[in-house]
Image (cartoon, rainbow, N blue to C red):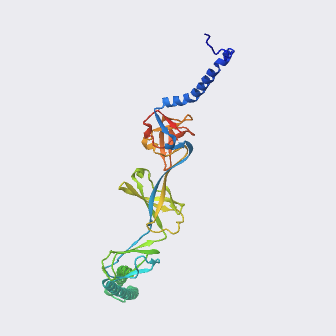
Amino acid sequence: MKIADTSAQDVALEPRSPARRWLPAAIVALALVLIAWVAIPSVQRWAGSSVTVPMDRLRLATVQRGDLVRDASVQGRVVAAVSPSLFAPADGSITLLVDAGAEVEENQVLATLDSPELQNRLQQEQATLDSLSVELERQRIEAKQKDLDNRKNIDLAKVTLVAAERERRRAESGFQIDAISQIDYEKTKDDLETARLAHEHAVADARLDAERLAFELQTKELQLERQRFLVQDLARQVEDLEMRSPVRGIVGNLLVEQKAAVGRNQEVMSVVDLTAFEIEAQVPESYADDLGLGMPAEVTVASQAYPASVVSISPEIIQNQVTTRVRFEGQMPPGLRQNQRLTTRILMEEKRDVLTLQRGQFLDSGGSRVAYVLGSDNVAHRRAIEVGARSLAAVEIVDGLAEGEVVVISSIDSFRGADSVLVSD
């Protein structure tokens, strides 16, 4: 029995060439090479980096060259640069003429003080002044009278001296012709000497009396002058019983009640000068050593910066803050109000043409000594840095970074101190 086969259906095939047999394998090998060329760098970066961080979790900044202003921005409040207080000049009863918050003009009477004791003392001292004035005039009249008497005595002594000299000449002529005796001649000599002495003493007495009277007159004048000063001082005190505003502004606090009895030097009220304001700012203790008088500052009012300067610094630190006073330079901003809150920027240092980098959490987490620089291969490499002056927005780079490098400025705690970190897209 013959078994049928499929030979009638078979098709004779020609043998393949060697090139066609290896073509698929070559294509597969080429594809593997391309995949490896693309994947190997990524694999190498992944293998060399022990930490991988997504890009969207990082903040980056570029190292730039420019000017760095070291400053401190704090909140301050508007205070009156001039806020004088009024004190009672004497004991008495006070009458208030204004209310708290009232606008007042300079030299306007704000209150009056009734002090009968002071007014009575002024009247007494004024009477004493009038008495001394009368006494001085009487002393001047007596001095004139005494001067007149002395001149009369001098004139009489002069007449007596002239008469004695004449009698002396006549006696001498008579004695030469034996017309008078020796005794009479000697007597004329004695009379002449007596007259001469009387004249000299009259002149000396007049000179001494003139000096004495001038001294007594000067004493009276000094007493009168002293009394006049005393009366002027009391008159000033009585005038001060009308308490006037030293500045133009508004009445602050009233510290006494109407018609109350007040004591001497007791504070009565305060007046706020509305034309002179300053900013009182609390600066953190960390800036205390860097603050100095005259430092420039900027005060922001209604989105506009006004130049100012530091005029006072508190010598003590309270609650980790230093109290400073900032005064506007030039014209003050309009519309300021007492206790208004304003942003104050104190410029402590300015450096020009230095490397700067935006401030970020990397300074705290890296101790200001470590930064991660992002390369073109998306790998951030750890690098030691040295920083200098700091401002609110930037920090000076002294060493470790170059201009144009991109640095991770967000927190680097997640990098765990790795030498390199892969930043994934």
Q: Residue at x 49, y 70 (%)?
A: 275
Q: Is residue 65 visible?
A: yes
Q: Is residue 211 above or below residue 153?
A: above
Residue 187: % across, % down:
32, 86
Q: Which residue lies most toward the front here?
A: 1
Q: Is residue 132 above or below residue 61?
A: below
* Residue 12 falls left or right of residue 191: right
Total count of labels: 0
The one of 269 and 263 positioned closer to us in this rendering: 269
Quadrant assignment for the N terminus: top right
The one of 155 and 361 positioned closer to us in this rendering: 361
Residue 139: % across, % down:
36, 86
Q: Is residue 222 visible?
A: no
* Residue 15 falls left or right of residue 71: right
Residue 283: % across, % down:
42, 55
Residue 78: % across, % down:
45, 65
Residue 34, by quadrant, is top right
* Residue 304 falls left or right of residue 202: right
Residue 416, by quadrant, is top left
